Image (cartoon, rainbow, N blue to C red):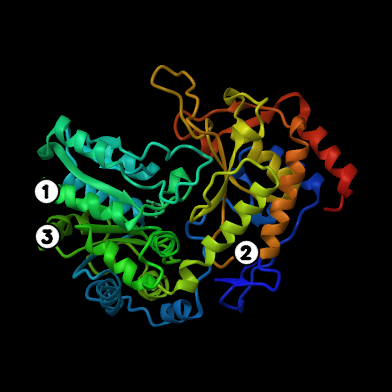
Amino acid sequence: MNLKLTDGSLLPIEMHKVRIVQKTSLPPIDDRLKAIEEAGYNTFLLRTRDIFIDMLTDSGTNAMSDNQLAAMMVADDAYAGGESYYRLLDAVGDIFGYKYCLPAHQGRAAEHLLSKVFVEPGKVVLMNYHFTTTKAHFELHGGKVLEIYCDDALETKSTNPFKGNLDLDKFQAAIEKYGAGNIAFVRMECTTNLIGGQPFSMANLRAVKELAGKHGIIVIMDASLISENAYFIHEREEGYKDKSIADIVLEMTSLADITYLSGRKSTCVRGGFIATNNEKFFSAIKPWLPVYEGFLTYGGMSSKEVEAMAVGMREMVDINVASSSADLIKLFVEDMDARGIPVVTPPGGLAGHIDARKFLPHVPSLQYTAGALTSAIFLVSGVRSMERGTVSTDRDENGNEVEADVELARLAVPRRVYSVSHIKYVVDRIAWLYEHRDLVGGLEFIEEPPVLRFFFGKMKALNGWNKKLADAFKADFGSEV
Ligand SMILES: *Cc1c(COP(=O)(O)O)cnc(C)c1O
């Protein structure tokens, strides 16, 4: 929630109190220099003990509520027919309006099952934008992924409130080009992750459903971040100011034939599921569930997580929960923007993103602009962010480097974990880094894995910029912080 202060400014205020805490520490600059050196300038390889504020991801790192933790204590561990499943089924019925639910151990497992049933060689899958695991599964099953996002979706600086919208003209053109019968389904991803947590509008989803319905094409919604998308519809779309998040979520799910999610995001647990009202779809997926995941009533999830997810489903439609991350991200992004730091706008629903090409114009993509920026941010602050740029883009089949479309440093804001003072600290240190950006140089691989190199690859800093940056930091702040 945003509370208006006396001077008219908005303060994102926590509508919860902290009752369990995890201790953190701020290792001094020389320790951070050593830690990032040992991690090969790859933030995935840092250890928690070296990190002050962990903004790598919001996946599985959100704070659970007291009621979620309490529910875990009464989880039913029965292999088959466990009561925890039926409580999840009730929540899926009440919150999404669906009769059927197939749990899976996480989002990508749901995608695997959907691929198995709906994707085959030669089929085209249309979507507003891809997610890494989504694309991998659909392509492994022989599908061709076609992203038909709106024209300014990839513009980092924008005022479009719904950059996650699917382009209807491109949808129509795809139907004409491939034929409706060759389109496996159209997938709408809520709070579109890889373009900066950007939402689609209800009007867009409704239009997608209408066009799809006319041609007998299935609409599948990726609802991993549905509560944030619903909150943005509430805030930004005409006619939704007076509707509750619960009503908006129900309206969204009523426009999809199948909805699936990673429970690691909006529901604040670790798991996932596929849900639908279509008995034929349910029956087609069900036999595969025990093959890959587990029996229908737990689907590879711990029964404790099933139980907590049932509670998380109900809690995520509370506007104070749906907005908990988004309001903090708004403050974060607007504060950086006001200081001239090149950020992705409008603020999205899972992270603040910095455009590394604009931040470090002197560092070429093949010296890993975003990788250098995430390393430099860690060095000057102890804040861990994620590289989303050329390091995350593997070489092509001939072994050549591929420059990424965009070079981003992503600073995720896990739900209910960090406070306004944490965010203000992060902005301050990034602003300092921006003033000293000329000191930051490029990186070079010293260990490059053949696939998904961003996970385990190691690099080194070119021309000793790491030490020069640390020296400049110490000159301004001393060596204690
Ligand atoms: C995280 C995520 C996934 C994958 O889910 P996992 O639980 O990590 O397997 C799929 N889609 C979206 C939009 C996500 O954010």
Front residue of 207/265: it is 207
Q: Earlier in the sequence, mark 1 or mark 2?
A: 1
Please name the amino acid that badge 1 sits on.
Lys
Q: Is residue 382 left or right of residue 322?
A: right
Q: Which quadrant of the rendered structure holds the N terminus?
A: bottom right
Q: Is residue 270 left or right of residue 368?
A: left
- Quadrant of the image occupied by residue 472: top right
Name above or below for residue 268 compared with residue 386.
below
Q: Disc count in the image?
A: 3
CA distance for labels 1 and 2: 46 Å
Closer mark to the observer between disc 1 and disc 2: 1
Disc 2 on helix, strand or loop? Answer: loop
Residue 106 visible in this rendered orientation of the protein: yes
Q: Earlier in the sequence, mark 3 or mark 1?
A: 1
Name above or below for residue 211 compared with residue 266.
above
Front residue of 187/205: it is 205
Disc on res. 283 = 3
CA distance for labels 3 and 1: 24 Å
Asked whether the residues under the numbered discs 1 and 2 touch, taking CB atoms below 8 Å apart as contact, a structural biologist would say no
Disc 3 on helix, strand or loop? Answer: helix
Front residue of 200/369: it is 200
Q: Where's residue 422, x and y in %?
A: 69, 61
Q: Which residue is mark 2?
A: 418
Please name the amino acid that badge 3 sits on.
Ser
Disc on res. 214 = 1
Disc on res. 138 = none
Disc 1 on helix, strand or loop? Answer: helix
Please name the amino acid that badge 2 sits on.
Tyr
Q: Earlier in the sequence, mark 2 or mark 3?
A: 3
Closer mark to the observer between disc 2 and disc 3: 2
Q: Where's residue 133, x and y in %?
A: 37, 44
Name above or below for residue 420 compared with residue 111.
below
